[in-house]
Image (cartoon, helix red, strand yellow):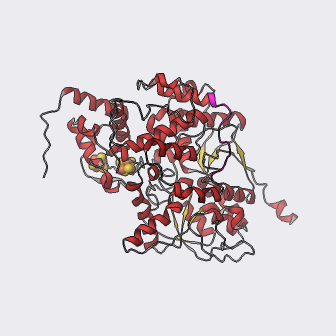
């Protein structure tokens, strides 16, 4: 189609500096695989930050706010040095929040900026922005390309889009979407042919690391999220964070056991990364996207594309 | 209805409370006790003093009461309270500042969350990144919850989530210097231990869970 190429303006290449985060090749492996698949499809180039370190997430911030800022600023500074001119994208919303907190802290005052450079012993201009992957894919120009690459449909699958805390709160840091009723993931799911539901637990906390350190207190947070999704008729929960996903996906079985012991109805809600569902309607197979690595079984979804049914055999 | 006895509040308590608000850069007196923070708090069911009561106690100078409360340690830092407060009281920051004050005095009303955060930080200090398997294993060892989540390990291995991969930064020394510099400033009295060579088995920062002078209380 030479004609089309001649009339449409050349697309600005999509390039971002990439912060994978500590869970990228472990518990968040499906997120990494499906992100890579979607990125390939929409020609989004992800250039990994050399020698990035842990963002510190809440443990560092709780210990000392400066620690989270300094650890994140180190990776941002390495990004500016190795990938000049590129903004940073972090698929994990926890990483996104830490990186963005560091950027806004360093930009706030010259004394803050000096303190950060003193701590990381490196020049840091604080010129690169930090974005979540959801924000990057939701930008209108990118969403247009996403739409062009979609060849199947989720056929009205009823999905509860779950954003969690860190991607929207505090809004002064995240500067993204509506903190109480965000829509960006819902819009992408609509493009994929799903029916995003209106529900109340979009931005409720999943308990984060409290699911390890205070499991008995925190399990109910997951249960409430599953319960509200179920009450609203969700056939799936869609996520944008590896920790939220692990908490929901890994614990559903255990929560169901407890519910059955109490004589309550168990849930049957598979949990997907938004990138898995996008990849699926772009023609990816369950294996390529990492969908076969879930803990709670995924359901068969006919999306009308050869060889990318979700009828995946989940690893035993 | 419970009444609060204010006769024991000293001027030292009042000064300590204002230090908490200075650290958090939040004035508890802005709060008019509407309770909206508490209505949305996902952890309120586990708190001995709900967020509204923590703020009220700070207003009244009840330093000991907030210091021994479990609430700041079960707070998940989800920021719902801060975002919804009509008076823009950033409650989550106050929770954090109370926690730091308690820790300075050798108190940790909830042992587990503190152990977890310490191990997390010492993991970063030694590897530059967090190896989730080490993290969980050391947490189990130090918290005494030895078999927690062990049943999930084979499933994680089968999914390629756990393996012998090396997940650390090349310039580990740079990350270590950052951690040490920030924590030394905190004058937590543990700066000596920061200079010890680290191995995954030595939890260093910022205060070793086994160090004396800390009170243990179970989270559950
Ligand atoms: S929401 Fe704000 S004003 Fe209302 S009780 Fe909580 S801190 Fe006070
Ligand atoms: S930040 Fe803490 S106190 Fe505030 S709503 Fe979340 S868990 Fe509750």
Is residue B163 covered in magenta?
yes
The foreground one among A253 and A72 is: A253
Using residue A106 as the reference point, say whether residue B48 is left or right of it.
left
Using residue A214 as the reference point, say whether residue A270 is left or right of it.
right
Asked whether residue A101 is in view, the answer is: yes
Q: Residue at x 12, y 34 (%)?
A: B7
The foreground one among A186 and A97 is: A97
The foreground one among A124 and B167 is: B167
Which quadrant: the C terminus of chain A? bottom right
For the image, the number of numbered tags is: 0
The foreground one among A112 and A50 is: A50
Give percent across and percent down for residue B135. Answer: 53, 44
Give percent across and percent down for residue A42. Answer: 73, 58
Give percent across and percent down for residue A76. Answer: 62, 37
Asked whether residue B81 is in view, the answer is: no
Is residue B197 covered in magenta?
no
Q: Quadrant of residue B70?
A: top left
Q: Quadrant of residue A106?
A: top right
Give percent across and percent down for residue B185. Answer: 45, 24
Residue span colored magenta: B162-173
Reply above or below: A300 against B137.
below
Reply above or below: A35 against A47.
below
Which quadrant: the N terminus of chain A? bottom right
Q: Residue at x 58, y 42 (%)?
A: B130
Q: Residue furthest right?
A: A2
For the stretch drawn in magenta, the main secondary structure is loop
């Amino acid at each position: 189609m030479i004609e089309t190429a001649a009339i449409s303006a050349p697309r600005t290449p999509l390039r971002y500096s990439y912060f994978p985060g500590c869970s990228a090749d472990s518990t968040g492996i499906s997120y990494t695989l499906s992100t890579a698949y979607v990125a390939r499809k929409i020609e989004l180039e992800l250039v990994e930050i050399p020698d990035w370190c842990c963002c510190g997430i809440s443990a560092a911030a709780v210990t000392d706010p400066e620690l989270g800022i300094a650890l994140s600023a180190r990776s941002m500074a390495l990004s500016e040095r190795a990938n000049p001119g590129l903004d940073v994208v972090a698929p994990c919303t926890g990483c996104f929040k830490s990186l963005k907190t560091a950027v806004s802290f360093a930009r706030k005052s010259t004394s803050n900026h000096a303190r950060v450079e003193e701590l990381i012993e490196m020049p840091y201009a604080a010129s690169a922005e930090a974005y979540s992957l959801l924000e990057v894919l939701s930008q209108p120009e990118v969403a247009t390309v996403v739409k062009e690459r979609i060849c199947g449909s989720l056929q009205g699958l009823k999905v509860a889009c779950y954003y969690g805390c860190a991607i929207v709160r505090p809004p002064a840091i995240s500067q993204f979407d509506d903190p109480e009723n965000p829509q960006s993931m819902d819009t992408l799911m609509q493009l994929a042919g799903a029916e995003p539901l209106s529900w109340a637990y979009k931005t409720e906390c999943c308990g984060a690391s409290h699911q390890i350190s205070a499991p008995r207190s925190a399990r109910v947070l997951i249960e409430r999220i599953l319960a509200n999704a179920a009450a609203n008729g969700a056939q799936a929960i869609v996520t944008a964070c590896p920790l939220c996903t692990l908490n929901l996906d890994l614990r559903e079985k255990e929560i169901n056991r407890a519910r059955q012991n109490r004589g309550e109805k168990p849930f049957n809600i598979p949990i997907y990364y938004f990138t898995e569902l996008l990849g699926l309607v772009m023609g990816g197979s369950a294996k390529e996207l990492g969908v076969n690595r879930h803990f709670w079984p995924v359901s068969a979804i006919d999306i009308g594309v050869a060889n990318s049914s979700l009828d995946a055999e989940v690893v035993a | 209805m419970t009444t609060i006895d204010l006769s024991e509040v000293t001027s030292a308590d009042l000064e300590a409370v204002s230090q908490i608000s200075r650290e958090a850069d939040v004035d508890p007196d802005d709060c008019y006790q509407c309770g909206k923070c508490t209505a949305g708090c996902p952890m309120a069911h586990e708190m001995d003093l709900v967020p509204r009561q923590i703020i009220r106690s700070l207003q009244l100078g009840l330093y000991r009461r907030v210091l021994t409360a479990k609430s700041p340690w079960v707070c998940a830092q989800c920021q719902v309270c801060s975002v919804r407060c009509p008076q823009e009281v950033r409650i989550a920051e106050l929770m954090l500042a109370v926690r730091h004050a308690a820790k300075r005095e050798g108190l940790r009303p909830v042992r587990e969350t503190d152990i977890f955060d310490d191990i997390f930080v010492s993991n970063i200090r030694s590897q530059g990144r967090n190896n989730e398997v080490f993290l969980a294993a050391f947490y189990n060892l130090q918290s005494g919850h030895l078999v927690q989540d062990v049943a999930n390990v084979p499933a994680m291995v089968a999914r390629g989530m756990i393996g012998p991969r090396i997940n650390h930064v090349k310039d580990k020394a740079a990350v270590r210097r950052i951690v040490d510099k920030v924590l030394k400033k905190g004058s937590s009295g543990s700066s000596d231990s920061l200079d010890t060579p680290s191995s995954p088995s030595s939890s260093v920062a910022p205060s070793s869970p086994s160090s004396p002078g800390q009170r243990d209380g179970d989270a559950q």
